[in-house]
Each structure stands twice: as structure tokens, then as C-alpha cells.
Image (spheres, rainbow, N blue to C red):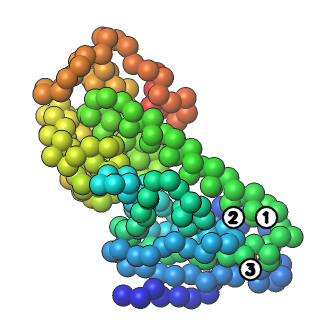
Amino acid sequence: MPPRARRICLLDADSDLADQLEPGATPALRQAMTVFVMGLDAGPHDLGGPRDGFGLLLLDGLIGCETAIGDRIAVELLGAGDLLQADPDAGEMILERRESWQVLWPTQLAALDSAFADRVRPWPQIAGALVRRAIRRAADLDAVRAISGHPRLELRLDLAFWHLAARWGRVEPSGIHLALPLTHRLLGQLVAAERPSISHALARLSRAGLVTGSAGDWHLVGTPGEHLDALMSRPLGGSRGRAAPGRRPPLSRREPTARGGGGRVPRLGP
């Protein structure tokens, strides 16, 4: 289906941006913050976005941004609050890179083009908030890159689940519920592994009582510390390599909050 476009005031759809400003928006500010919003159904879409301004702002939904070099594909998950913009230097790269976008949940995107950037110039708090979001996305990619550097696939998968749970997880009595539509193929693209290897590693995590479920209904049983103790003290059945007992690295120094609500995701680290 073609995108469904409408006009809204961004202050009504993004509370974080509204919080950057003094209460009681003036008519001039509301006019400046009025943007076109597209509604997209699940499926493939061309989302290069405007090449000027701030790009496309995700108001809600979930998008998989796929990058392919040769026959290898890496995916990045984008959700509410993330900015998406076409790479202006993509044509100048030595290696050919292909980008595609899969809308995984029905999504709304606001177009923050150059006209929007000009209109909000009297309110620099808006630009500052959007720059912080771009920095947050870059930091998130750094974390995924570090996770993908671990040699043991079970550990990569487990860390990726907990990383995603900090944003999209919901606390439940046994641990964390993660409703993301993470198929074995998508998980492989997240942690740099082939789909059959993902299936075997998930089976080992399930037998160990750490991760259960399937796409759209994943459950992380226990706490991050318990998972790390189990994975670092000994390899699960069928995996190679052994970590020194009782040692686990300081993988995080903060206690993230699950944006999906339902409580606080336990700290990942010592």
C-alpha cells in the first residue's frame, strides 16, 4: 500500500521534544513544528528520506535497516525517536554498499526536511535534541559492533537480546519479555552468523534455561548477571572455547530502563 500522509504538530506526537521547550507552546512554535507524517504498513519500503534537513523521524513502529556488502547483510533496528537519513556520500565509497528497509511493525515517520530546519531555527533546543538522538543511534551501533566481536555465538546472541531488552523489553516474573519479531534470519544479521548456526545456538540457550520462545515472543529467564555467570563459566553443550571460571567482564555501568514499560531491566554487568 502507498504511504498515508497527513499533517500534525510534532509537539503532540513526540513528548521528548515538547519537554525541551517552555510549557505552553505559542502559535508560532506550533506552526513551525507542523510536519508531514507518513504511515507505513509492514513490508519493504524505500526510506532514503530527505537528503537535507534532519531526515525522517520515527514516531512509532519498528524498522530494520539492512546494509549489504557482497553477500553479507547486517541489520540495525530503529524505533520511536530514531532519525533516518540517506547517506549523502554513499556513491563515493570504494566498496559497493546496498541499503534496504523493512518495516517490521506499522510505522509513522515525520519528514524533518530543510524547510523544517529553517522554521525551528529560533528554538535551538529542538536541533540539540535531534543531534543527541543521532549520537544515541551511533552509540547503539558501537554496542552492537562490540557484541558482534565476541567469538562465542551463544554469548553474542544473549548479549544482543539483553541489549535490545533495555529499549524494548518488559519485565515479567521470570525475567524479561521481548516482543520484537526477531526471526532466526534477523538474529543472524544482528550478530553476524548464519541462520542454521543461530538455530543451534538458540536451542542450546533454551536447554540451559536462559532464552526461550520464538519471533515476537522471546523470554529472557533470570537476570543478566545469571546469564553471564552461566555463559562465561563454561560453554554450553556443542560450543567451543572455555572462559575462566568466575570471571565476567564489566559489560555495562548503567541500569537501563525498558522503554516498553513494565519495570526496570536489571543491570548488565558486575
Indicate whether 17 appears above or below 136: below
Pinpoint residue 207: horizontal percent, then vertical percent: 13, 34
Label 2 or label 3, whichever comes before in sequence order: 2
Give the Cα separation between the discs numbered 1 and 3: 20 Å
Q: Amino acid at mark 2?
A: Leu
In front of the other: 197 or 18: 197
Q: Along the horizontal axis of the image, is 260 left or right of 81?
A: left
Indicate whether 164 appears above or below 28: above
Indicate whether 166 appears above or below 79: above
Q: Amino acid at mark 1?
A: Leu
Q: Point out the frontmost of discs 1 and 3.
A: 3
Pinpoint residue 115: horizontal percent, then vertical percent: 74, 80
Mark 2 in CB contact with mark 3 (< 8 angstroms): no
Q: Along the horizontal axis of the image, is 212 left or right of 56?
A: left
Give the Cα separation between the discs numbered 2 and 1: 7 Å
Q: Residue at x 56, y 60 (%)?
A: 92
Give the Cα separation between the discs numbered 2 and 3: 18 Å
- Label 3 neighbour load within 10 Å: few <14, some 14-19, many 20+: few
Number of dots carrying numbers? 3
Residue that badge 2 annotates: 17
Q: Secondary structure at mark 2?
A: helix
Q: Residue 21 shows which numbered tag?
A: 1
Q: Secondary structure at mark 1?
A: loop
Residue that badge 3 annotates: 115
Corner quadrant of residue 100: bottom left
Indicate whether 258 appears above or below 125: above
Corner quadrant of residue 105: bottom left
Q: Along the horizontal axis of the image, is 63 left or right of 210?
A: right
Q: Amino acid at mark 3?
A: Ala
In front of the other: 124 or 14: 124
Label 1 or label 3, whichever comes before in sequence order: 1
Pinpoint residue 98: horizontal percent, then vertical percent: 41, 63
